[in-house]
Amino acid sequence: MKLYSTNNKNLQVSFKDAVFNSMPQDKGLYMPVDIPKLDNDFIANIEQYSLPEIAYKVAATLLKDEIPAKDLKAIIDDAINFEAPVVKIDKATFVLELFHGPSLAFKDFGARFMSRVMAYFLQDGEQLLDVLVATSGDTGGAVALGFLGVPNTRVTILYPKGKVSLIQELQLTTNGENIRAIEVDGTFDDCQALVKQAFADEELNSKFRLTSANSINISRLIPQTFYYFNTYAQLKRQGNNEVIFSVPSGNFGNIGAGLLAYKMGLPVKQFIAATNINDTVPRFLNSGVYETRPSTQTYANAMDVGAPSNWVRIMDLFENDVTMVKEMVTAYRFDDEETLEGIKNIYSAFGYVACPHTAIAYLAIAQFRKENPADHSTAVFLSTAHACKFPDIFPAEIAAKIEVPYQVMQLETKVKYADVLGTDFEGFKQYLLSK
Ligand SMILES: *Cc1c(COP(=O)(O)O)cnc(C)c1O
């Protein structure tokens, strides 16, 4: 698989280069030069296959020239070792639960696959890979747990003191081994600024092999296609064919992967992009004007993104033709009050506890059906995180119903360890150089 930069189709690199560099120098994003289609036979019989089998088939279709079959299979079996069940909540509505991995969020798919692909490319004797990541909560946990124990890698996570939930903090700070956490006395933006400065620093780059693990990395996007195919397989077993996906969206990586799956031949009727009030994309699809804004904090904080970095990928998939994008993607936005109402409605109607991000995707299906009363398609909303990660948002009655998963019970027995740093770059640089 060769990849080009969305800013320059003549600039082409190998998959390995795109994995280690995340972003082209020209600040575009890497996209596959060719998007191969899965064979018709496979799609027609997909209900016969398990998630790891589907994941392997999809990955091999994209990466067969990059990673030999046996190695790719081992990577998949190690990375995708948890379920992604599709749960029926009424006659035509299903929720795709993507929170059964170690960090209880869908980012586990991307982080686990990326870490194993990186480890694979770091052949014996290559310099230790130093992953630097700033997190506002969910990314750090997925990356920490994804890289934990992966040979020849070390992860440094910066998080803003007092601004992540208790469970998120435990996921970042209780790992040890090749994972270290830095509690920064500042905001998420300060953490991100420190990481950016480190990547630009000559001395650090000459001493360490630095890489980022952010969501624009192509090796995080690819594994997110797996569960769209797997959902189709699960629904097909139950006699459903035309599917609508509603995706809670922030940086638009998750829905971007869904659209990539569609381009690879997955039958999908419609995608719905569901956002909170950080609604750059819904506004764009309504007005045709793409105007980013600074982000605003909401209950669905993993979607508090004013400039969604993966949107250019989606435009690129549709040759930058807005009309074509609009045929396939409908977008709605919901504020905090509506989100809370959505959580209460899902609970009272179906006895199901949805995290705020998930509730927004549910609301978007309801809105779509209101606007398209003749459309009786089966709809699936993606549940991107377990409700227990956001305990403060739920009314007491619903909070009491949240089941604590074993991943959290294990965490509660562990001891937090984080180094504390300020927001000045010199301090961070000396810290890195001294270790
Ligand atoms: C990261 C995240 C999102 C947003 O996903 P994108 O791929 O950035 O659109 C939604 N929900 C949860 C819980 C997340 O952690």
Image (tube, rainbow, N blue to C red):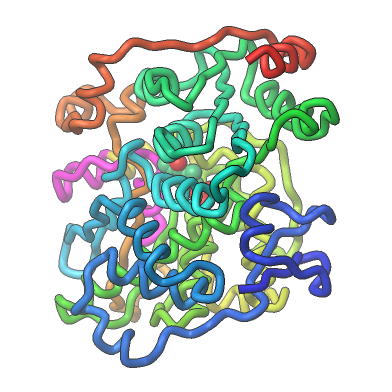
Give the residue furthest to the bottom: 41
In front of the other: 425 or 333: 425
The vertical placement of 69 against 418, above or below, is: below
Q: Quadrant of the N terminus?
A: bottom right
Whole-percent x, y for residue 4 in the image:
73, 69
Asked if residue 337 shows in the view, the reply is: no
Asked if residue 196 shows in the view, the reply is: yes
In front of the other: 81 or 287: 81
Whole-percent x, y for residue 345 in the image:
25, 45
The vertical placement of 71 against 39, above or below, is: above
Left or right: 248 with respect to 215? left
Which image quarter: residue 320?
A: bottom right
In front of the other: 435 or 396: 435
How many numbered callouts? 0
At 40% from the left edge and 61% from the top edge, which residue is drawn? 246
Q: Which residues are magenta?
A: 344-366
Is most of the magenta stretch helix, strand or loop? helix
The vertical placement of 56 against 403, above or below, is: below
Q: Quadrant of the C terminus?
A: top right
